[in-house]
């Protein structure tokens, strides 16, 4: 049986709520994921950011999808912006497995969201047996209920692709409402993830289809971001769901 560790972590631009840098690289590498999804991955000046360092330390390939500039009002309130060219922030997906295809899914715009458009970023990876699976990262809108249509669009796109699939990311919504939208999926991880210092809600999720068996899963500790990371060890039980 092919096994796969998937993890997701909203890195909050690599700073605490007070705007102080934390060890985002160490926290991400400690997840030891085969496919790692990072939200709010910041590249000051648009140059390689900490996601590139994480990918190198994990011996993985980095795929990035910027969604806003670092002048966007969605940035952390106390983020110290360096002088010079404008940087960007968005999704990063790192894979230690061979990537055979990349998929960008337009998730549209949620009303009053200061990010013009949100996207999902999927990587189709080759597992040791030769089977393939698609892991899609997302950072859905924080506008109340705005995330649900976006998650539905991502789910539809993955089902159209066929094969085993996983959705991982900051869904900005609790499990039960998302479950009502992702009816053919189930949560691989259950536990409070936000706010990290004293979490009361789970808004960071890994959603699997029936191709997968959940072997192990956990919510990680408070590392400095406002979100806690989550990870799941998955076993492929059906290569053609």
Image: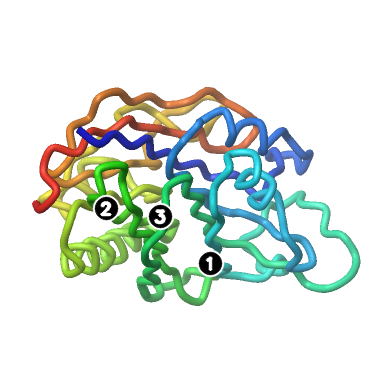
Horizontal and vertical percent position of residue 170 = 42, 48
**Which label belongs to residue 137?**
3
Q: In this view, does 10 lie above or below 143?
A: above
Alpha-carbon span between mark 1 and mark 2: 20 Å
Which of the two labelled residues, at mark 1 and mark 3, occupies the earlier sequence position? 1
Horizontal and vertical percent position of residue 131 = 23, 50
Task: Give the SS element for disc 3.
Answer: strand
Horizontal and vertical percent position of residue 233 = 32, 30
Which of the two labelled residues, at mark 1 and mark 2, occupies the earlier sequence position? 1
**Which label belongs to residue 73?**
none
Circles 1, 3 touching at the beta carbon (< 8 Å): no
Residue plotted at (72% across, 69% down): 71
What residue is disc 1 on? 65
Residue plotted at (53% across, 45% down): 10
Residue plotted at (40% across, 32% down): 231
Alpha-carbon span between mark 2 and mark 3: 13 Å
Few, some or many C-alpha atoms within 10 Å of disc 2 (few <14, some 14-19, many ≥20)? many
Of the two numbered discs 2 and 3 in the rendering, the one whose residue sits closer to the viewer = 2
Few, some or many C-alpha atoms within 10 Å of disc 1 (few <14, some 14-19, many ≥20)? some
Task: Give the SS element for disc 1.
Answer: strand
The front one of 107 and 91 is 91
Q: In which quarter of the image is residue 156?
A: bottom left
What residue is disc 2 on? 133
Few, some or many C-alpha atoms within 10 Å of disc 3 (few <14, some 14-19, many ≥20)? many
């Amino acid at each position: 049986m092919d096994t796969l560790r998937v993890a997701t972590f909203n890195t909050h631009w690599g700073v605490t709520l007070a705007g102080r840098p934390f060890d985002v690289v160490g926290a991400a590498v400690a997840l030891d994921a085969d496919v790692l999804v990072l939200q709010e991955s910041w590249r000051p000046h648009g140059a390689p950011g900490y996601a590139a360092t994480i990918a190198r330390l994990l011996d993985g390939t980095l795929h990035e999808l910027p969604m806003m500039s670092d002048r966007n009002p969605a940035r952390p309130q106390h983020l110290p912006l360096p002088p010079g060219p404008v940087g960007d922030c968005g999704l990063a997906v790192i894979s230690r497995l061979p990537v055979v295809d990349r998929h960008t899914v337009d998730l549209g715009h949620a009303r009053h969201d200061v990010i013009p458009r949100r996207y999902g970023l999927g990587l189709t990876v080759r597992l040791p047996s030769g089977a393939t699976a698609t892991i899609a990262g997302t950072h859905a809108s924080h506008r109340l209920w705005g995330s649900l249509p976006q998650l539905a669009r991502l789910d539809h796109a993955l089902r159209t692709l066929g094969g085993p699939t996983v959705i991982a990311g900051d869904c900005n919504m609790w499990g039960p409402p998302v479950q009502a939208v992702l009816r053919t999926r189930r949560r691989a991880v259950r536990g409070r993830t936000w706010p990290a210092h004293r979490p009361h809600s789970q808004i960071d999720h890994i959603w699997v289809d029936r191709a997968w068996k959940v072997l192990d899963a956990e919510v990680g500790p408070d590392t400095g971001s406002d979100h806690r990371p989550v990870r799941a060890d998955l076993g492929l039980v059906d290569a053609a769901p």
